[in-house]
Image (cartoon, rainbow, N blue to C red):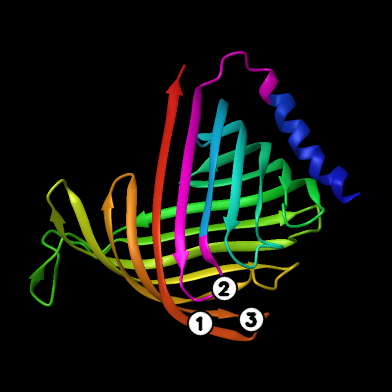
Amino acid sequence: MHLRLAVLPLILLLTSASAFAFPEALPGSVWLNGSRDMNGIEGYGTMGFVNQGVQWFSLPGEIPFTTYAAYSWRIREKNRTHYNTNGPSVGAEISKFSTQFGMEYAWQDYPNLPDYRKSFVTYLKTYQRFDFLKGDEPSLLGIPVLGFPTTFWTSVTYDYGKLEGVGSMGYLNQGIDWFRLPGKIVFRTLAAYHWRLRSLNRAFYNMHGPGLGAELELAPFTAGVEYAWLWYPELNRNTKDFRLYLTAYFDWGVQR
């Protein structure tokens, strides 16, 4: 019954899209993250996706409707059993103000399990970055700075395959952009709060906690170091250690 309820909205959306012969755009994106956690639980890790879509039409309110094919992965060195996964997916979504709501059918391989999941996933994702503290001449205690960027990213998902359940991952950070190095590289310090939670197979996955760090940004790349206080509730364990990371994000949208 749950599967039929999941499939029906996707079929209706795809049927509606087929009536439009000429797509509006061909949006795509790539997100890459590499990290090194020194807390003894995660080790080296990488996470990311590659996505190519077809924007068929826009609903009232300039809300694009897009179908897509994607490949995603989540891999780390330690405690991999219910964490490591990779595989392709196809889906459909609507988006507005850097927020996407959609459904996809995913073929996910869990290499450390005998399970090869084929199931629907419903998701809500958003990425917001703003600077409401900047003003005309930003400064901190009289020291000139470039700005005070606030960044929020989260993904909320429901896995119909009953392997991960309801989940959420994301972060909220408040930065201070101090100055630019040669090559337009921005030096930033930040305070952050991270979370990664789900309702099923939670051991070695669920965690949350604050961090303090510094990073260099040369768009689309960001490299940084952070000292994080993380709580793993299923392990009843607190960790305090450094984390290194490198991220990159590219997107494109070919207008037709």
Please tell me whether mark 1 sits on a helix, a strand or a loop: strand
Residue 147 in view here: yes
Q: CA distance from mark 2 to mark 3?
A: 13 Å
The residue type indicated by label 1 comes to: Thr
Q: CA distance from mark 2 to mark 1?
A: 9 Å
Residue closest to the far top = 21
Residue at image point 45% right, 60% down = 35
Label 1 Cα crowd, 10 Å radius (few <14 / some 14-19 / many 20+): some
Q: Is residue 141 left or right of residue 100?
A: left
User: Which residue in the structure is indicated by mark 1?
Assistant: 239
Residue at image point 55% right, 31% down = 52
Q: Is residue 245 above or below residue 220?
A: below
User: Which residue in the structure is indicated by mark 2?
Assistant: 41
Q: Is residue 162 left or right of residue 142?
A: right
Residue 150, percent from left and from top: 34, 63
Residue 63, percent from left and from top: 53, 36
Q: Earlier in the sequence, mark 3 or mark 1?
A: 3
The residue type indicated by label 2 comes to: Ile
Please tell me whether mark 2 sits on a helix, a strand or a loop: loop
Please tell me whether mark 3 sits on a helix, a strand or a loop: loop
Instruction: Give the extent of the magenta segment.
Output: 17-44
- Give the quadrant of residue 49: top right
- Give the quadrant of residue 72: top right
